[in-house]
Amino acid sequence: MGTTATETAIPHDQMQPSDPKNVRRAALAGLIGTMLENYDFVIYGTASALVFGPLFFPDISPVAALMASFSAYAVGFAARPLGGFFFSHYGEKLGRKWVMVTTLFLMGGATFAIGCIPDFRSIGIFAPILLVLCRFLQGFGAGAEQSGGATLLTETAPLGHRGKLSSFVMVGAALGGVLGAGAWVLAQQLPEDLLMTWGWRAVFWSSLVVTIAAAVIRSKMAESPVFEELKETVDVTGQAPLKVVAKHGRTSVLRVILMNWGVSTQSYMYQVFLIGYLAAVVGVSTTFIPPVQLVASIAAAFAAFATGWLSDRFGRRRMTLVLCGILVVTPFIVFPGLNSGSRVVIMAIIILGYMFAAQGVVGVHMSYLPELFGSRYRYSGVTLGREISAVIGGGIAPLLGSALLGLFMDSWIPVAIYMALTMLVSFLATLTAPETVNRDLTIPTDAKKGEARPRVRA
């Protein structure tokens, strides 16, 4: 399973942060940025399941409208690799901070604009076209967001604490889920006619507050010390990062795609598809779902931090394998539980799903994936791997889940098999990866076995 925690001592001076203030600012910046990203995605995903069908696709059946809504949702994931290609290029040239500030305004602006789009009955076919366009811009901006936060935090955190501090990226994502669910809880207190006219719009307009707060915090953070050191030794302005990663990092990019495929799939199946499944198939009231999401997101924030912290103690590879192994078998338990109709059982499943599938594994990935890459193309490698897997995983997962339900006459078994198989791929891909805990991030080449430097326990 990798090296143990007693193999190699790390010199004391390497264990200390050079500037604790910068570490704290980087952690807060990573947290609040991904909080905005996931807030945007949660409110959009919930709207896709609950209101976008009748608003933007009113002349088709409810199931077809759900699939159309999820198709528009998937467009954002298709845009993510394009945004990742674009912004990772500048992340390697201009720095991690520049990208993290720029993507904030693109994501926040697109989300605000969604709340301004007239519905289908007002402008006809232009309504869903504008919705898809805004969703594309939302995904384009998000393409380098989490990877940028993970890379900067991993490169800034002191040895022995990378997993814990990098997990703040996913703590922020979970808190974005809390805010998103909370916004929908408040919106659903409105009478249905008000919710369907301006209430849902107010949910999207509220992203402006988070955008401004995140921009202020990120403008004050320092650049990654690893990037600053790299600039002194390599002409980063003259290199083409995507060509470098294509030449030297293909194996690691492919490994990350497979490691994250099942994780991304199950994450968005829990956060998006199961919402629609509960409403359309099980018949659960839509007013019950957002409060459950709210509680689940709070629990997921703690889970992301816990798994990141545990990976510092027990290793990235071991923690990832344990969590992925659990998630290979759970889909066959989840659907019978949901179909029982018991609100207690449903709540437990959604909470545990958020903790393990939505945030648990990625809490480890936030330090594991950057540690897999060499310093010359770390940002590009992490971004390409994660965002390509987001398309084939999270982007199409809700749509494919809906298609499988329709094809097999509402049977949950094919959906469970799909979830399990993708996670099995992630488990097997992780088996091929080296342990990376506390690896020297200034090494220009990708990680290999034996480079991990675990702490000696007292």
Image (cartoon, rainbow, N blue to C red):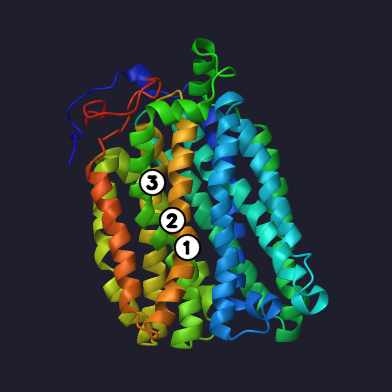
Q: Earlier in the sequence, mark 1 or mark 3?
A: 3
Q: Which residue is mark 2?
A: 392
Please state the horizontal and vertical placement of residue 235, each as a whole percent of the image. Answer: 55, 14
Quadrant into which the N terminus falls = top left
Nearest to the observer: residue 109 or residue 457? 109
Q: Residue at x 59, y 37 (%)?
A: 87
Q: Which residue is mark 3?
A: 257
Helix, strand or loop at disc 2?
helix
Nearest to the observer: residue 197 or residue 161? 197
Q: Is residue 451 left or right of residue 295?
A: left
Q: Earlier in the sequence, mark 3 or mark 2?
A: 3
Quadrant into which the C terminus falls = top left
Instruction: Please tell me whether residue 20 is drawn above or below residue 300 in the rendered image.
Output: above
Callout 3 touching callout 2 (CB < 8 Å): yes
Please state the horizontal and vertical placement of residue 143, each as a whole percent of the image. Answer: 56, 46
Please state the horizontal and vertical placement of residue 300, each as a whole percent of the image. Answer: 43, 59
Residue 240 marker:
none
Instruction: Please tell me whether residue 91 is drawn above or below residue 433 in the rendered image.
Output: above
Q: Which residue is mark 1?
A: 396
Q: Where is residue 334, by image quadrant?
A: bottom left
Q: Is residue 157 in view? A: no
Q: Residue at x 48, y 66 (%)?
A: 271
Amino acid on which the number 1 mark rests in the picture: Ile
